[in-house]
């Protein structure tokens, strides 16, 4: 929950007298269930499932301090649904000082067809991780990691009052 300010180009100022707005974005609850398995001394596996309560985000509402296109509030439907994330990770102790790590996750989208917007170009996502940790001393470890995020491509035909746009959305990241 917070306040925002925006600057309107001079050509559009007659349609927008507002100087500030207020908007609330509800954050989802998260329920997690996970466990680890230590196979022998060198190998450890971890599994995790998250249920994310995105259904709390049903609309995006802006309240303006003065009219914008004749209105003091705008409401765009979001209609998010709850989603799940599944994670699997492994750590292998190659030596007493060197840990090798890898993982994979699947993150189910909360955004339904027709509700993709530029601020949330969301889709089902696969994530792949690799990393290593090297213990230098009793209290010092160097960790290095890499994450590849691969979001599925989605076609969108905007639902009425969603604020979305028609088009093809694709995204990814190297972290």
Image (tube, helix red, strand yellow):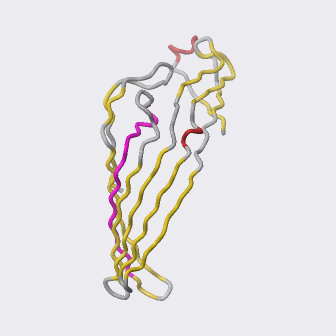
On the image, which quarter does residue 7 sit in? top right
Residue 123 falls inside the magenta stretch: yes
Q: Position of residue 70 (x, y in %)?
A: 62, 11
Name the foreground residue: 20 vs 115: 115
Magenta extent = 117-134
Would you say 112 lies left or right of 95 here?
A: right
Question: Residue 78: horizontal and vertical position, in percent?
Answer: 52, 30
Image quadrant in which you'd find residue 61: top right
Q: Residue furthest right?
A: 65
Q: Is residue 46 above or below residue 136?
A: above
Q: Where is residue 20 drawn, in percent x and y?
A: 65, 27
Tell me: residue 13, above or below residue 97: above
* Residue name at image x 36 percent, y 48 percent: 125
Q: Nearer the viewer, residue 83 or 171?
A: 83
The residue located at (48%, 69%) in the rendering is: 35
- Observer-nearest of 38 and 96: 38
Q: Quadrant of the C terminus?
A: bottom left
Above-or-below relation of 163 to 52: above
x, y percentage for residue 31? 56, 55
Q: Quadrant of the N terminus?
A: top right
Residue 42: image quadrant is bottom left
Q: Is residue 77 above or below residue 11?
A: below
Specify whether residue 37 is painted magenta: no
- Numbered-mark total: 0
Identify the residue at image location x=37%, y=75%. 91
């Amino acid at each position: 929950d917070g306040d925002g300010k925006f600057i309107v180009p001079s050509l559009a100022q007659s349609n927008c007298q507002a100087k500030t707005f207020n908007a609330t974005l509800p954050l989802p609850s998260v329920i997690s269930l996970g466990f680890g398995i230590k196979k022998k001394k060198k190998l450890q596996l971890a599994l995790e499932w998250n249920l994310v309560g995105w259904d709390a985000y049903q609309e995006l509402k802006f309240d303006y301090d003065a009219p914008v296109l004749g209105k003091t509030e705008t409401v765009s439907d979001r209609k998010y649904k709850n989603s799940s994330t599944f994670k699997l990770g492994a750590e292998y102790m190659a030596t007493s000082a060197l840990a090798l790590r890898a993982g994979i996750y699947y993150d189910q989208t909360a955004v339904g067809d027709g509700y993709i917007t530029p601020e949330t170009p969301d889709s089902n996502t696969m994530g792949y991780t690799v990393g290593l940790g090297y213990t230098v001393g009793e209290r010092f470890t160097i960790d290095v990691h890499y994450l590849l995020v691969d979001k599925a491509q989605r076609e969108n035909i905007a639902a009425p009052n969603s604020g979305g746009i028609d088009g093809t959305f694709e995204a990814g990241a190297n972290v």
